[in-house]
Amino acid sequence: DVYKRQLYDWERNNLISIPRRPDNGYRVYGAHEMNRLRVIRMLRKARFANMAILRVMTHLDSGRREDLKTVLDTPMREDDCRMPCFSDNWLSTLMDSEKCAREAVNHLEQMVKKYA
């Protein structure tokens, strides 16, 4: 099942830790775990890498709520990859693309006014 494999992957990558029932070892998903899974799922759908998500979750777990965009968007030296993944700089890339698109639209509008 795809969803089971996804949950195991997230657990194996330390994105989530699910408590287990002592009598049978089954996982117990409470409100905290469900909320965390929603955040992870949303960030994965936005194509963030597991390492970027782990940085944010670790930041949140430490009680910090500030600078989440920076934490999500900035690979750390200790991250387990030699080169940052594209998705580790997703927010910066989107903001740069938006800036370029706005500049292009402004340029086109100026051209239209000039030659109209």
Image: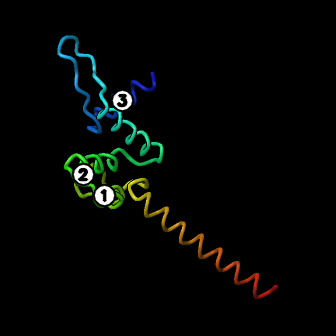
Residue 3, image x, y percentages = 43, 26
**Up-down: is 115 above or below 60?**
below
Residue 64: quarter of image: bottom left
Q: Amino acid at mark 1?
A: Val
Decide which of 21, 95 is in the foreground and name it: 21
Q: Answer few, some or many: residues within 10 Å of disc 3's Cα (few below 14, many 20 plus, some between 14 and 19).
A: some
The residue located at (63%, 75%) in the rendering is 104
Residue position marked by numbered label 2 in the rendering: 59
Residue tagged by mark 1? 71
Residue at point 26%, 49% (across, down): 60
Residue 68 picture location, percent across and down:
32, 57
Q: Dot 1: few (<14), some (14–19), or many (≥20) neighbours within 10 Å?
A: some
Q: Position of residue 37 (x, y in %)?
A: 36, 36
Q: Amino acid at mark 3?
A: Leu
- Disc 3, SS: helix
User: Compared with residue 5, is residue 55 higher up or lower down, i.e. above or below?
Assistant: below
Q: Which residue is mark 3?
A: 7
Q: Does residue 68 sit above or below 103 in this rendering? A: above
